[in-house]
Image (tube, coloured by chain):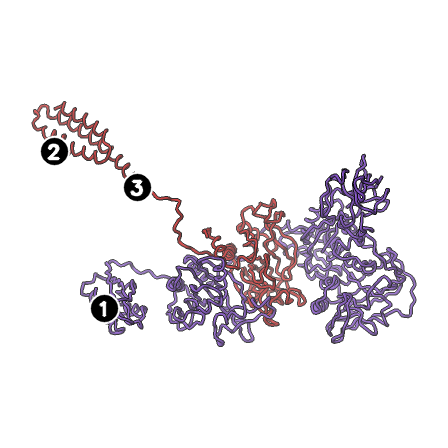
Chain colours: A red, B purple
C-alpha cells in the first residue's frame, strides 16, 4: 500500500504539473478525490489494512491527500485567474476613443470673475448691493461732487434719457443711494453694468461693467484702503502680488489714487501683458470726498471712508488674455466653451 | 501734454537724470508718462562733412566723385548726382551703414567708382526749413560754414531730443505747461526751479488812438489785460523756437504768432495778438448778438448766439473770445503794431462755444481746462520778454488791466494729527511743512495748528484732505501701511437673497448644458416690429436714448429675446451647428415722471438638430423646480412664438414666463434657421422665498406598477389625463409616467392612444389585490366619464 500511495503521489504531481487549463485540474481532482477517485478508494481500502499498520497507513494517505489537494488548489487558483484575465482582455477597448461627454454649460467669463471678486469681499464683511442702471443725474453726478461744468456730463460722454435722467456712467451712483439710506458702518460692494457713448472697437464697448466698493466708518484710513486692496490682489492673483498707489484724480475721492498690481504674467519683470512695466492698472480708488459724505447726510468730521472701482471687463480680459473687447459680447459658443475647457 | 526734455531743463536741471528715472518720478507724483517720443527720427551714422575735391565720373555725365573730410584720418569718397555742391561746402554725409528715415546706406560702386555713402538733402533727412535753412532746397542740404566737421547731424540740427507725453489729470490745469510740470518735478527731485525770464524794457508810447478795454460780460470774463508792441518786424521765429513748437505739434507761422503759441506751451496762458490797425475805437469784451456773423482765421464763417463771447471794437467783432481770432485780427508780415491780449474766460463758456461751433483751437482747449488768475500776468510778461529779446518790436508803456473779480485766497486750518489720521500713518509736522512750502503754499504753524494758504494757481485745493494728498504725493504712497480696518466694527458679508437666487438658477442652467451670454442693453427700435409685437403691447413701452450711437443701439430693451436671436443668428452664420444659451439681465420699461421700471429677466435660447419643444420643456421644468413656485401652463399668445408650439407660465394667475418654438416669420426677420426654441422668465415678477425641503420618510412597503392605455379624442390633452389620474389616485399614486403615444391603423381617425405607467406606493401597509384593482378601476371609470377615454385591452 505504501508503494501504491507513493506511486499515486508521484504520478499526480507530474500530472498536475503537466495540466494546462483549469478543466484539466478539475478532472485530476475528480480522478483523485471523486467518488471513485484513487485516493478515495485508498481511504476505503484502509479498513482492510491490518490494525497494527492502519494508523501509519492512514497518516500516509492523509498526508498524500493534503499535499495533492494543496497543490491542485494553488495551481487551480492561478490558472483560473489567468484564464479570467485572458477572457477580460478579449473585451479590451480602445481607451483613446473620445469620451461621451455630458454637456455642461458655463457662466460667462465676466461673471466668473465677478463671483470671484464678490466672494473675496463677502469674506471681508461686505454686502453685495445693486442700484438702478438708469439713474437720476443727481445720483450719477451731483451728489458725487462732479462739477456742473465737468466734461463727463457732456453728451459725448453720457447717454441721456431726459435732462435729469441718464444711463449711469459709473457704479458709484449706487454708493450715494446706499449712504443716503444706511448709516455707517457701511461695507458694500456693488457690481453692475455702466454705459458711456464710446464707439465699439477692440478696446471700447458702450456698455461695460464695474465693481464698486465702499467702506464708511469711524477712523477709516488710507492705509486701510491699501491693506484691503493688497489682500484682495493677493487672493485674486497670487500670494506674491504687490500693489502700488499712484496719485490720481476723481471728483468723488480725495486723496485719489490709481492702483497697480504687480504683473502676475511675469512676476513684475516685464512682459507683453504689462507692456514691460511690471505693473497692471487694476482700479481707481481713494478716500471718500467730504462733500460726498455731507451730501448723503453723513458727518465727515465723525466718519471717513474709502471707495474703489474696477473695470470688470478689463480685469477679465487681462486674466484670460482676451485681446478684443467685442468678443465677450458676441456670444459665439466657441468662445463660451473655452471657459470650461471643453472642446468645441 | 508734450514735454520736450531740453525745455524742461531750462527750468529744472534734469540733465543728469536718466529718462526712466524721470518717468518714474513723474509717475510717483501723479503724472503718468503715456509715451516717450524721440524727435530725432530714424537717423544714424550721418555726420557733417566738408567737400575737399570734386571730379567727374569718367563713365557718366551726371555723376560726380567727391572726396570728403568727415573728421576721420582718411577722406571718404562718395559719388553723387547732385548739381548744387561745390568744393568747400559742408554737407550732411550718410556714411557706409547709415540709416535714414526711408533708407539704409551701404557702400556700392556707381558706374565703376566705389561710393562709400551718400550726401543728403533735407527731405532725405526728413526735415524742413523749420529745422534749418535750405532743408527744402531741391538738392543737397548745404550747411553753414561753421558746422563742425564730423559732428553727428542730429546733434548739429538740434533734433536729438526726447519728448515725454504726459497725462495731466483734470484737476491740475496748472500743470498743462512746461513751467507747471517743472514746478512739480522740481519738488519731486528736490531741486530748485527757475522762473521764466520776464525781463524787458518799455518805451514811451503816445498815440491818441490807444484802445481802452471794457468788460461787458463779467460773469464770463473775470480779467482782461492788454499791451501794445510797436515797430514790429514780423519775420520768421528763430530755429530753436520753431523746433520746440514742432516738437509739441504746432506748426510755426511768424514770430508774433509763434511767441503766443510758445508762451501757451511754456506757461499755459493763451494769448491773442491783434493787428492794431484793424481796431476801431475801444475793445469790448461782450456777448455776441443773435446770429452775429464772424469770419474766423481758418477762413470759415460762423454764426454766433447770445451765449458766446466775442472780443469786439466799437464797430465789429474781432475774435471769438478764447477760441479763434477773426479776419480783422490776423497778424501777417505787414503788421506793424500789435495789441496783445492776456485774459481769463470761464471754461464752461469756452467749451460750449467750441462745441456748438464745432471749432477747436489750442487756445480753446487750454481755456476749457481752466486758466488761473496768476498765469495771465506770467504769460503776458513772458511774451513781452520774447518780443523784446528777439527784437520783434518795441514794448509800449501802455497797460490795460481790467479785473471784475479777484479770487479769494482760501485759508485751510488743519494739523499733522488730522492729516495723519486720514492717511493712517504718522507724518511729522516738519515734513508736512517742508513739502507744502516747496509747493509754494504758505504755512503758518502755531503749536499743533497749521494755517495753510495755497498759491492762486492751485484752484483745486479746498480742504485738509487736499492738503493730505499733496503731502502723501511727495512723502510717498509706498510709505502707507497695509491695515485691515481695525477701527471698523465686524460686519456680515452677504449677497442679497435675489442675487443668491439668481446664482442658483444660473448654476442649474449650466448643469442643463446652457452657456451664459452677455449682450448690450440697448437695441434697435425696430426690434419690436421684427418680433411681430402688436402696437398696444407693453414691450413697446420703450425708453429711448436721446443721444444714441446709432439706430442699432437707440432704445433700452424691454425683452431679452431679440438679443438672443441675434446671438443665435451670429452662431448659425459661423456654422456653429448647435448651442444652448442663456442671458440674465435687466429689461427697462418707461415710467411717467420717474425712473424707468427695471425688471430682472432670464432668457434661454436653444437650437440645433436635436432640439425640440420637449427638450426645452425639460429645461423649463428643471428651472421651475429651482424656483419652487406652483405654476400652470397655458397656450401662449406671444406673437413671436409659434401659436401651436408655445406656452405661457402662470404663477398665481400672473404671466411669469413664456416658452416655445420661434414663429417662422420672426425667424425670417432675424435670419435664424427655424429650429430655435426660446424660454423667457420674468424673475422680478416671481417671489423667491427660499424653499426648505421637508424630509418624507422612505416607504417600507413594496410599490406596485400598473400600465394603462387609453384611446381618446385628439381634443383631450395628455396633461388633463395626467392630472385626473393623480387626483383620482390620491396619495397612493406616487408617480404617473406617460410612456407611449400612438396614432395609426388600429386607432380611429381623430383619436390617439396614450399609455401611462402608474406607480402605486402604500406607506402604511401592503395593499391587497382588490384594493389595487379598485384604484385602477376608479381611474379607468373617471377617465371614461370625463374624457370618453376607452381602455385598450392588452
Quarter of the image where the N terminus of chain B is located: bottom right
Q: Which mark is residue B716?
A: none
Protein chain holding label 2: A
Q: Nearer the viewer, residue B640 or B474?
A: B640
Q: Is residue B492 visible?
A: no
Q: Is residue B544 visible?
A: yes
> Which residue is under mark 1?
B791
Q: Are marks 3 and 1 on the same chain?
A: no
Q: Does residue A257 lie above or below B498 as drawn?
A: above
Q: Earlier in the sequence, mark 2 or mark 3?
A: 2
User: In which quarter of the view is residue A74 placed?
Assistant: top left
Q: Residue B759 at what x, y percent from top left?
A: 26, 62
Q: Nearer the viewer, residue B244 or B121?
A: B121
> Which residue is under mark 3?
A88
> Which residue is under mark 2?
A36
The 10 Å Cα crowd at callout 3, few under 14, some 14 to 19, many 20 or more, is few
Amino acid at each position: 500500500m505504501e508503494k501504491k500511495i507513493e506511486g499515486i503521489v508521484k504520478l499526480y504531481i507530474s500530472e498536475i504539473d503537466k495540466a494546462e487549463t483549469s478543466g484539466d485540474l478539475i478532472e485530476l481532482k475528480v480522478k483523485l478525490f471523486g467518488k471513485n477517485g484513487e485516493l478515495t478508494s485508498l481511504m476505503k481500502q484502509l479498513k482492510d489494512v491490518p490494525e497494527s499498520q492502519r494508523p501509519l497507513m492512514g497518516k500516509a494517505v492523509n498526508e498524500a491527500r493534503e499535499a495533492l489537494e494543496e497543490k491542485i488548489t494553488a495551481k487551480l487558483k492561478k490558472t483560473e485567474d489567468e484564464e479570467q484575465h485572458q477572457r477580460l482582455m478579449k473585451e479590451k477597448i480602445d481607451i483613446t476613443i473620445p469620451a461621451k461627454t455630458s454637456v455642461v454649460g458655463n457662466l460667462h467669463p465676466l461673471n466668473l470673475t465677478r463671483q470671484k471678486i464678490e466672494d473675496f469681499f463677502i469674506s471681508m464683511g461686505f454686502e453685495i448691493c445693486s442700484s438702478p442702471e438708469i439713474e437720476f443725474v443727481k445720483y450719477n453726478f451731483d451728489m458725487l461732487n462732479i462739477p456742473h461744468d465737468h466734461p463727463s456730463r457732456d453728451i459725448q460722454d453720457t447717454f441721456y434719457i431726459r435732462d435729469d435722467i441718464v444711463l449711469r456712467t459709473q457704479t458709484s451712483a449706487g454708493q450715494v443711494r446706499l449712504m443716503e439710506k444706511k448709516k455707517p458702518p457701511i461695507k458694500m460692494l456693488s457690481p453692475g453694468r455702466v454705459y458711456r457713448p464710446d464707439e465699439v472697437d477692440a478696446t471700447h464697448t458702450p456698455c461695460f461693467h464695474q465693481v464698486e466698493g465702499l467702506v464708511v466708518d469711524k477712523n477709516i484710513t488710507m492705509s486701510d484702503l491699501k491693506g484691503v486692496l493688497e489682500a484682495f490682489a493677493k487672493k485674486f492673483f497670487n500670494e506674491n502680488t504687490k500693489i502700488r498707489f499712484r496719485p490720481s484724480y476723481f471728483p468723488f475721492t480725495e486723496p485719489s489714487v490709481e492702483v497697480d498690481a504687480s504683473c502676475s504674467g511675469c512676476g513684475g519683470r516685464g512682459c507683453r501683458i504689462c507692456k514691460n512695466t511690471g505693473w497692471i492698472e487694476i482700479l481707481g480708488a481713494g478716500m471718500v470726498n467730504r462733500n460726498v459724505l455731507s451730501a448723503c447726510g453723513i458727518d465727515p468730521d465723525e466718519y471717513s471712508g474709502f471707495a474703489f472701482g474696477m473695470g470688470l471687463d478689463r480685469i477679465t480680459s487681462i486674466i484670460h488674455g482676451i485681446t478684443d473687447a467685442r468678443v465677450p459680447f458676441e456670444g459665439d459658443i466657441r468662445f463660451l466653451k473655452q471657459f470650461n475647457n471643453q472642446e468645441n | 501734454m508734450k514735454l520736450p526734455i531740453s525745455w524742461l531743463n531750462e527750468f529744472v536741471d534734469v540733465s543728469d537724470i536718466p529718462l526712466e528715472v524721470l518717468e518714474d518720478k513723474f509717475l510717483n507724483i501723479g503724472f503718468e508718462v503715456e509715451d516717450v517720443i524721440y524727435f530725432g527720427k530714424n537717423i544714424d551714422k550721418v555726420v557733417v562733412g566738408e567737400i575737399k575735391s570734386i571730379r567727374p565720373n569718367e563713365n557718366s555725365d551726371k555723376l560726380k566723385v567727391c572726396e570728403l573730410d568727415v573728421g576721420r584720418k582718411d577722406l571718404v569718397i562718395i559719388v553723387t548726382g547732385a548739381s548744387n555742391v561745390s568744393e568747400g561746402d559742408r554737407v550732411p554725409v550718410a556714411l557706409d551703414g547709415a540709416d535714414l528715415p526711408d533708407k539704409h546706406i551701404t557702400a556700392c560702386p556707381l558706374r565703376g567708382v566705389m561710393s562709400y555713402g551718400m550726401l543728403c538733402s533735407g527731405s532725405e533727412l526728413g526735415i524742413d526749413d523749420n529745422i534749418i535753412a535750405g532743408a527744402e532746397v531741391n538738392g543737397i542740404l548745404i550747411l553753414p560754414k561753421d558746422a563742425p566737421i564730423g559732428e553727428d547731424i542730429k546733434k548739429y540740427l538740434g533734433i536729438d531730443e526726447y519728448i515725454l507725453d504726459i497725462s495731466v489729470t483734470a484737476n491740475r490745469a496748472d500743470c498743462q505747461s512746461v513751467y507747471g510740470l517743472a514746478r512739480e518735478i522740481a519738488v519731486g527731485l528736490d531741486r530748485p526751479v527757475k522762473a521764466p525770464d520776464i525781463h524787458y524794457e518799455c518805451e514811451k508810447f503816445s498815440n491818441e488812438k490807444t484802445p481802452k478795454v471794457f468788460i461787458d460780460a463779467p460773469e464770463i470774463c473775470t480779467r482782461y489785460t492788454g499791451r501794445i508792441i510797436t515797430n514790429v518786424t514780423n519775420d520768421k521765429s528763430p530755429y530753436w523756437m520753431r523746433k520746440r513748437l514742432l516738437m509739441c505739434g504746432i506748426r510755426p507761422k511768424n514770430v508774433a504768432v509763434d511767441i503766443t503759441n510758445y508762451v501757451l506751451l511754456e506757461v499755459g496762458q493763451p494769448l491773442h495778438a491783434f493787428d492794431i490797425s484793424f481796431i476801431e475805437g475801444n475793445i469790448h469784451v461782450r456777448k455776441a448778438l443773435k446770429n452775429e456773423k464772424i469770419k474766423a482765421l481758418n477762413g470759415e464763417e460762423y454764426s454766433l448766439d447770445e451765449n458766446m463771447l466775442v472780443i469786439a471794437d466799437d464797430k465789429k467783432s474781432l475774435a471769438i473770445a478764447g477760441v479763434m481770432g477773426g479776419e480783422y485780427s490776423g497778424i501777417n508780415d505787414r503788421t506793424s503794431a500789435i495789441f496783445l491780449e492776456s485774459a481769463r474766460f470761464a471754461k464752461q463758456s469756452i467749451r460750449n462755444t467750441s462745441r456748438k461751433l464745432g471749432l477747436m483751437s489750442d487756445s480753446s482747449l487750454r481755456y476749457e481746462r481752466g486758466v488761473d488768475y496768476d498765469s495771465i500776468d506770467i504769460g503776458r510778461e513772458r511774451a513781452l520778454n520774447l518780443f523784446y529779446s528777439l527784437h520783434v518790436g518795441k514794448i509800449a508803456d501802455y497797460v490795460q488791466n481790467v479785473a471784475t473779480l479777484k479770487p479769494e485766497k482760501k485759508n485751510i486750518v488743519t494739523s499733522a494729527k488730522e492729516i495723519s489720521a486720514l492717511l493712517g500713518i504718522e507724518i511729522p509736522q516738519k515734513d508736512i511743512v517742508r513739502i507744502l512750502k516747496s509747493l509754494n503754499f504758505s504755512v503758518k504753524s502755531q503749536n499743533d495748528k497749521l494755517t495753510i494758504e495755497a498759491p492762486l494757481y492751485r484752484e483745486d485745493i479746498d480742504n485738509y484732505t487736499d492738503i493730505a494728498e499733496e503731502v502723501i504725493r511727495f512723502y510717498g504712497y509706498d510709505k502707507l501701511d497695509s491695515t485691515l480696518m481695525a477701527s471698523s466694527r465686524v460686519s456680515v458679508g452677504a449677497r442679497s437673497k435675489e442675487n443668491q437666487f439668481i446664482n442658483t438658477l444660473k448654476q442649474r442652467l449650466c448643469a442643463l448644458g446652457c452657456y451664459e451670454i452677455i449682450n448690450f442693453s440697448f437695441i434697435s427700435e425696430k426690434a419690436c416690429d421684427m418680433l411681430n409685437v402688436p402696437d398696444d403691447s407693453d414691450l413697446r413701452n420703450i425708453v429711448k436714448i436721446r443721444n444714441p450711437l446709432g439706430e442699432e443701439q437707440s432704445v433700452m430693451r424691454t425683452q431679452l429675446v431679440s438679443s438672443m436671436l441675434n446671438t443665435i443668428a451670429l452662431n448659425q452664420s459661423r456654422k456653429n451647428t448647435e448651442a444652448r444659451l442663456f442671458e440674465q439681465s435687466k429689461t427697462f420699461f418707461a415710467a411717467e415722471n420717474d425712473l424707468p421700471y427695471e425688471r430682472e429677466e432670464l432668457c434661454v435660447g436653444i437650437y440645433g438638430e436635436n432640439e425640440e419643444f420637449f427638450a426645452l420643456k425639460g429645461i423649463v421644468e428643471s428651472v421651475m423646480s429651482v424656483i419652487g413656485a406652483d405654476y400652470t401652463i397655458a397656450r401662449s399668445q406671444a406673437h413671436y412664438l409659434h401659436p401651436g408650439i408655445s406656452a405661457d407660465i402662470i404663477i398665481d394667475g400672473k404671466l411669469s414666463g413664456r416658452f416655445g418654438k420661434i414663429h417662422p416669420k420672426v425667424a425670417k426677420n432675424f435670419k435664424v434657421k427655424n429650429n430655435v426654441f426660446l424660454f423667457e422668465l420674468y424673475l422680478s415678477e416671481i417671489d423667491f422665498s427660499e424653499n426648505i425641503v421637508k424630509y418624507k420618510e422612505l416607504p417600507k412597503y413594496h410599490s406596485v406598477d400598473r400600465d394603462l392605455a387609453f384611446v381618446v379624442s385628439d381634443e383631450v390633452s395628455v396633461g388633463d389625463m395626467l392630472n385626473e389620474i393623480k387626483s383620482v389616485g390620491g396619495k397612493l399614486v406616487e408617480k404617473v409616467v406617460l410612456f407611449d403615444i400612438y396614432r395609426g391603423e388600429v386607432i380611429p381617425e381623430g383619436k390617439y392612444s396614450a399609455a401611462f405607467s402608474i406607480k402605486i406606493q402604500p406607506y402604511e401597509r401592503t395593499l391587497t389585490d382588490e384594493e389595487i384593482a379598485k384604484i385602477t378601476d376608479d381611474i379607468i371609470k373617471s377617465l371614461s366619464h370625463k374624457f370618453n377615454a376607452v381602455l385598450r385591452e392588452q
